[in-house]
Image (spheres, rainbow, N blue to C red):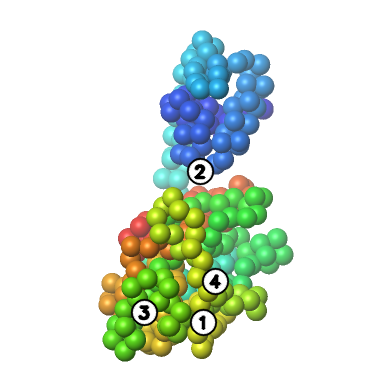
Amino acid sequence: MLRLDDLTVFVRTADRGSLSAAARELEISPALASAAVKRLEGELKLRLFARTTRSLRLTEEGEHYLRHAREALRLLKEGHDALIQGQASLGGTLKISLPSDLGRNMVLGWLDAFQAQYPRVTLQLSISDRVADMYRQPVDIAIRYGAQEDSSLIALPLAPDNRRVLVAAPAYLQQHGQLEALEDLARHNCLRFMLEDVIHDRWSFYRDAHAGPAVVHVNGNRSADDADVVRRWAVAGVGVAYKSRLDVSADLRAGRLQVLLPGVLGEPAPLNLLCMHRSQISPTVLQLREFLRAQCEKA
């Protein structure tokens, strides 16, 4: 049976002239893109691409089939759009797991706006920095920072380029002075996050986009297993924090916090919306993903 995802990969690969480029655009791995094309060729019993180690081009059969594949995808999109437009509004119950700081201080307000736009949506929220076990807990989707390690989960990017930043309050900097280099962290009170009883006291930085990480061991008189508490300590002026830029974006705009060493790249902290399987990616989830992604871009 032909799969919609395989048709999409085929058309995008033909358009881009490259499996890797199509994979990046579709936010999948090159291996999955290659497998999709091979699966489609097996179903059709046709060779759609002529491949060499350096090039990829459509065969004559591939060029002929491409027209049909485009038309099929166009009709399916029209049907999907008509279905969405025909609904009075999106609805249903979403059980969402959120990280503490971002959840309380940013996403809660975004979800209020989302529900105002789609009043038939019901929300059940679990807010904690402990990673929810989506297979055992009553969670439909999770919003999480970091690279996705569980390959069985579907990850929809919300803020793929987000990074951590060093921050401190103006009052703290007036008393203790600015940082001139990463080595200066040794003389500052560093506010540390703790997860599963492990204190994260090794902070990684990148002096440029191509260099390996510089790992700095930090010390301080406070640590917490709640990222919101760490941010509040930083705003209160009691130390230096290493936070996701999204978490502190409002504090930076308001001047409650300042970025330290802006020329040094912080650790990547991509934000994703996670589902256990594609059947959970309903129109409501897709709309929420687009809504949250737009809010992240504005933050």
Q: Nearer the viewer, mark 3 or mark 1?
A: 1
**Residue type indicated by callout 4:** Arg
- Does residue 288 show up? no
Q: Nearer the viewer, residue 61 or 74?
A: 61
The kind of secondary structure element at disc 2 is loop
Q: Residue at x 46, y 39 (%)?
A: 25
- Tell which circle, 1 or 2, labels the residue nearer the N-terminal end: 2
How far apart, in angstroms, are the residues tagged by discs 1 and 4? Answer: 9 Å
Mark drawn on residue 202: 4
How far apart, in angstroms, are the residues tagged by discs 3 and 2? Answer: 35 Å
- Tell which circle, 3 or 1, labels the residue nearer the N-terminal end: 3
**Residue type indicated by callout 1:** Asn
How far apart, in angstroms, are the residues tagged by discs 3 and 4? Answer: 18 Å
The kind of secondary structure element at disc 4 is strand
Percent coordinates x, y for residue 201 in the rendering: 55, 75
Percent coordinates x, y for residue 124 in the rendering: 56, 69
- What is the count of numbered marks? 4
Q: Residue at x 65, y 27 (%)?
A: 39
How far apart, in angstroms, are the residues tagged by discs 3 and 1? Answer: 15 Å
